[in-house]
Amino acid sequence: MAAPRPTGGTELVHSRIRQVRSERGITRRQFADDLGIHYQTVGYLERGEFAPSLQLALRIAAYFDLPVEQLFALSPFPLIERAPRAVATEAP
């Protein structure tokens, strides 16, 4: 496993890994194990402290079956508005 390369001095890479991973119920440890990387690297990626190599970015995109540009960007992603969930009511 390669050691994380800090983004210090380079352009920040924004990521949606945390959002997608948590929406799919995948733990940080499971994600790391599935990709063959250290679980702390996942944290670095999610916090923007580590810019992934092209190979790792492509592997992550394939893992989630999403295009790379839906997971990584050079500018912050817009917030996704979520519709309020309907509350189930009991019939009288």
Image (spheres, helix red, strand yellow):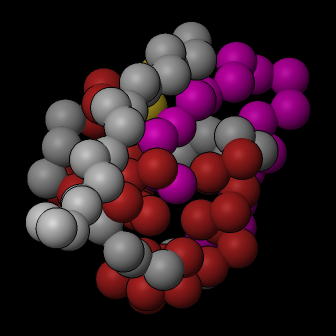
> Magenta includes 64?
no
Instruction: List x then y, in percent, for residue 49.
Output: 76, 44
What are the residue bounds of the magenta stretch? 1-18
Give the vertical position of 5 relative to 28 (above or below): above
Residue 37 visible in image: yes
The residue shown at (50%, 22%) is 79
Give the vertical position of 40 relative to 17 (above or below): below
Instruction: List x then y, in percent, for residue 10.
Output: 75, 22
Query: Which residue, as the protein is rendered here, is positioned at the far front?
Result: 92
Residue 74 visible in image: no
Name the quadrant containing residue 81. top left
Between 74 and 84, the residue placed more toward the observer is: 84
The residue shown at (71%, 47%) is 47
Instruction: List x then y, in percent, for residue 58.
Output: 28, 47
On screen, residue 72 versus residue 65, left or right, reads right
Q: How many marks?
A: 0
On screen, residue 83 versus residue 37, left or right, reads left
Q: Mostly what secondary structure, the magenta segment?
A: loop
Instruction: List x then y, in percent, for residue 92.
Output: 16, 67
The residue shown at (18%, 43%) is 66
On screen, residue 31 versus residue 51, left or right, reads left
The residue shown at (24%, 60%) is 88
Name the quadrant containing residue 68. top left
> Magenta includes 15?
yes
Give the vertical position of 91 relative to 72 (above or below): below
